[in-house]
Image (spheres, rainbow, N blue to C red):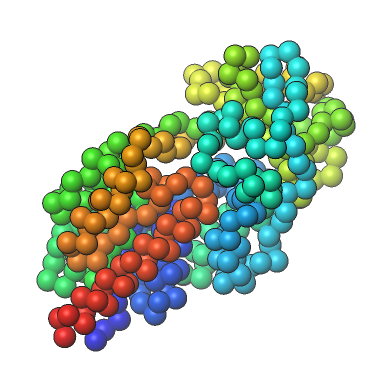
Amino acid sequence: MGVTRIAVVGAGISGLAAAWEVKRGSAEAVVLESERHAGGVIVTERRDGFIVEGGPDGFLAAEPELQQLAAELGITDRLVDQIARGSFVWTGRHLDRLPEGRAAALLGITDIAQEEIQKGFRSFATGMADITDALAARLGSAVQYAHGVATIEPSRNGYRIAITGGPAAEFDGVILATPAWEAARLLAPLGIPSRELDNVVYHPSLTVSLAYRQEHVPATLEGTGFVTDPEAGGAVRACTFASQKYPGRAPAGSRLLRAFLTPADDDAAALAHAELAPILGISGTPLWARAFSWARGLPRYAPGHAQSVAELRRELTRLPPVAIAGAGVDGAGVSACVRSGREAARTVLGNWHHATRINT
């Protein structure tokens, strides 16, 4: 019996975690990534001593998935704790302190237990890309960049995948760690109805990180940031005081803020500074600003999503080993994505071993 060869489509955190689990299961993982870099929406830029996040900036300390993965990769020493606590709401006139966890509710995040939020957040010393960089490095040549997937078809021993940027290849099993709409496209030729995946709506995300000299930002700035009351109006929905939330996010004598904006056609950086300056009492202009825009950034699920995904997974058991994973099916948090990817890998490996026993 040869080594099990599993295709993992997508090198975001879910796909990388899935490939790592496949490797730990003594099988061969081949990660097919259409872009020229790994990490998906986890993007960290290091600039002049600043650490700038384009996607998630941390994870709940109460959730074990990232910490366990860091231990397996030997980078536990890179974990850092949140150093500021507390948040505020901008009413349109002043900043009012919020009860712990209330900020998440104002932003529409209702699936996190209060006791988990109270335990705070963690991140990595030089940004969230520490974990995806470490995974990509350990997986090495198993991650094939600029290799998109055109089609997946059943073959005698599993699947035949047509690859853009490379020759077609045969695999014993497949893990789709892609956005929901892409998974739906790839499953359609296999005869699997995928309305559940087509119904996942991805909302746009726009953030602007702004660097300031310390003397231009009031020393009385407290907590991790603020959210804006919907009735207050304005483009800024929330702001994280990034250089106060985690250590090492800005060099000495500097401050780093991160604004979350509603999509706008205007200059996002200028708009963010114009709104933040009077709210926070900023007296100077930014040293620089960096905007990140994701046209399809944040998945939102229709009612009954979890049940629909469970039914879809039951349908997938009719096929040779194949699984779905990622934010589009199991939750948008980083920990949820890691858990989703690893469970998908265990499912595919378990189904492959089961099928092999039957066939032999």
Which residue corresponds to the image point at 53% horizontal and 36% vertical from the top-left?
A: 109
Which residue corresponds to the image point at 32% horizontal and 46% vertical from the top-left?
A: 307
Relative depth, front residue between 350 and 209: 350
- Residue 262, horizontal then vertical, whole percent: 53, 23
- Residue 291, horizontal then vertical, whole percent: 58, 33
Relative depth, front residue between 222 and 163: 222
Q: Quadrant of residue 33?
A: bottom left
- Residue 120, horizontal then vertical, whole percent: 69, 48
93 w.r.t. 321: above or below: above
Q: Is residue 48 visible?
A: no
Quarter placement of the N terminus = bottom left
Which residue corresponds to the image point at 75% horizontal and 37% vertical from the top-left?
A: 86
> For the image shown, how many numbered marks are present on the structure?
0
175 w.r.t. 211: above or below: below
Quarter placement of the C terminus = bottom left
101 w.r.t. 262: above or below: below
- Residue 308, horizontal then vertical, whole percent: 29, 45
Q: Quadrant of residue 319?
A: bottom left
Q: Is residue 284 visible?
A: yes
Q: Is residue 238 left or right of residue 225?
A: left
Relative depth, front residue between 20 and 350: 350
Relative depth, front residue between 330 and 273: 330
Which residue corresponds to the image point at 49% horizontal and 64% vertical from the top-left?
A: 136
Q: Is residue 145 left or right of residue 121?
A: left
Q: Quadrant of residue 74?
A: bottom right
